Image (cartoon, rainbow, N blue to C red):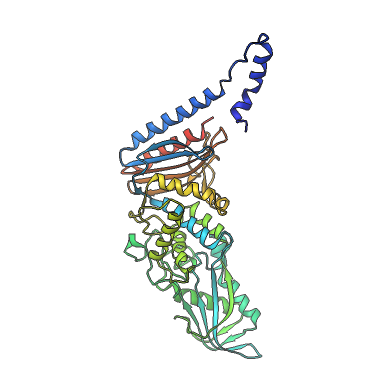
């Protein structure tokens, strides 16, 4: 294949050949020398940035188009990942569920339905780990779409239910009862919100975002009861939280957006709540109860099968400082994803430099704008950036920059310089 640099040099080559005396060799192309000099300049800029980052930082860059290892600096030493952990979470979720996979929230009943629409018994709202489940108004503003209590209420009305003699119970039993991850001692984290298999509006006590629900399943049951009553379906009892007993019948179901969409909502804005929910969903997909530990184990095993085993995954979001992997392992994950069927959706879930997500405010000009996609990561004294850059040469570079013991603001400036250097290779 003729490279873009060689293509630009063709007119010069033709002119040199036509003007050369008979029998004289054509003048050699300078394109390879220019390309070599461009890559050499890139390596120099990367090395300079990494010197400024200090000895607790590492980086690894590969030209994925040629397989050439371009740059490495302390690339095999594990570092705190911060939100680069989400790369491991979302890649495993996409592989486990498939890009078109969805998470279900169901209504189950235990009772009888009379000809005049009276359901004699109780309804159970059973959560399936959908992070988008909530009200139609909240979903429209937050995500554009998602599963709602209003849609479920409409489906029950379509079944013919006009009155419920019992009550609505909220069932969150498909997850464990821990509301947070290891960084918060498994209690509610202000950076995540309460985790539940029956999360409603992200566990917020109000749609304006004030406070958290004390009982997510009870809150969801109350919201669903309200949605039924808004459609004229009478419910006699007050909502409660309880696990559905055996012998119930499925009456209605609503689906989440596709896993591809959930991965994008997770990665582009670096959404901690979605990441932690998806990690528990990994365990749920295998028939087990959704727990952080089980999900982290599955995500680790998936990465290991790709030759990218992290040193440790403790949660799905990266809030725990125990999440660690080397830059070389992160690059191994990113390269392995290029060969998988889910790659297009995984790639599309990443923030675009200078355009959207957490990279939207960064790299607003220069060759990196629109050419690099990546996942950022920030904790106190930690900053990370890993992803893909399509350079001016047309080659694709895969990179991971993990900086520990740094000022995050200054580290982001160094990472931006490195991304510009990679994208600017001609």
Would residue 425 be found to the left or right of residue 58 on screen?
A: right
Residue located 54% across and 29% down the image = 426
The correct choice, above or below, for 281 with respect to 416 in the image is: below
Identify which residue, 116 or 246, lies in the foreground. Answer: 246
Would residue 290 be found to the left or right of residue 224 on screen?
A: left
The correct choice, above or below, for 251 with respect to 3 in the image is: below
Q: Quadrant of residue 273?
A: bottom left
Would residue 381 be found to the left or right of residue 373 on screen?
A: left
Identify which residue, 149 or 131, lies in the foreground. Answer: 131
Locate the N terminus and report the quarter of the image it occupies.
top right
Query: In the displayed image of the protein, which residue is found farthest to the front?
Result: 23
Residue located 51% across and 67% down the image = 130
Identify which residue, 75 or 170, lies in the foreground. Answer: 75
Q: Quadrant of residue 40?
A: top left
Q: Position of residue 354 (x, y in %)?
A: 52, 41
Give the number of marks.
0
Q: Position of residue 327 (x, y in %)?
A: 40, 44
Q: Position of residue 43 (x, y in %)?
A: 43, 31
The correct choice, above or below, for 179 with respect to 421 in the image is: below
Query: In the displayed image of the protein, which residue is found farthest to the top?
Result: 21
The correct choice, above or below, for 37 with respect to 248 in the image is: above
């Amino acid at each position: 294949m003729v490279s873009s640099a060689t293509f630009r040099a063709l007119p010069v080559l033709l002119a040199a050949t036509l003007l050369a005396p008979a029998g004289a060799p054509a003048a050699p192309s300078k394109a390879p020398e220019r390309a070599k000099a461009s890559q050499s300049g890139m390596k120099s800029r990367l090395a300079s940035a990494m010197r400024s980052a200090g000895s607790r930082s590492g980086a690894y860059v590969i030209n994925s188009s040629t397989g050439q290892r371009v740059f490495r600096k302390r690339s095999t030493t594990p570092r705190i990942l911060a939100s680069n952990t989400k790369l491991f979470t979302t890649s495993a979720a996409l592989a486990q569920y498939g890009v078109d996979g969805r998470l279900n929230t169901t209504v189950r009943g235990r009772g009888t339905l009379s000809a005049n629409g009276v359901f004699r018994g109780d309804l159970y709202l059973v959560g399936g780990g959908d992070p988008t489940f909530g009200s139609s108004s909240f979903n429209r503003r937050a995500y554009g779409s998602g599963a709602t209590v209003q849609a479920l209420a409409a489906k029950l009305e379509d079944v013919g239910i006009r009155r419920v003699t019992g009550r609505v119970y909220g069932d969150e039993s498909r997850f464990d009862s821990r509301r947070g991850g290891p960084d918060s001692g498994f209690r509610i984290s202000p950076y995540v919100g309460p985790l539940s298999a029956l999360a409603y509006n992200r566990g917020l006590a109000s749609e304006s975002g004030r406070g958290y629900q004390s009982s997510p399943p009870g809150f969801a049951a109350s919201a669903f009861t309200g949605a039924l009553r808004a459609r004229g379906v009478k419910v006699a009892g007050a909502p409660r939280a309880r696990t559905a007993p055996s012998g119930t019948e499925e009456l209605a179901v609503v689906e989440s957006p596709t896993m591809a969409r959930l991965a994008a909502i997770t990665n582009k804005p670096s959404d901690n709540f979605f990441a932690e929910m998806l990690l528990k969903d990994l365990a749920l997909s295998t028939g087990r109860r959704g727990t952080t530990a089980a999900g982290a184990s599955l995500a680790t095993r998936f990465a290991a099968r790709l030759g990218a085993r992290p040193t440790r995954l403790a949660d799905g979001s990266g809030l725990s400082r125990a999440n660690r992997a080397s830059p070389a392992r992160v690059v191994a994950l990113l390269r392995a994803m290029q060969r998988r069927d889910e790659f297009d959706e995984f790639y599309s879930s990443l923030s675009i430099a200078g355009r959207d997500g957490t990279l939207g405010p960064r790299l607003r000009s220069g060759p990196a704008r629109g050419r690099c996609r990546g996942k950022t990561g920030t904790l106190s004294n930690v900053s990370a950036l890993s992803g893909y850059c399509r350079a001016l040469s047309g080659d694709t570079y895969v990179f991971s920059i993990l900086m520990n013991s740094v000022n995050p603001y200054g580290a982001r400036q160094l990472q931006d310089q490195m991304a510009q250097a990679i994208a600017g290779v001609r």
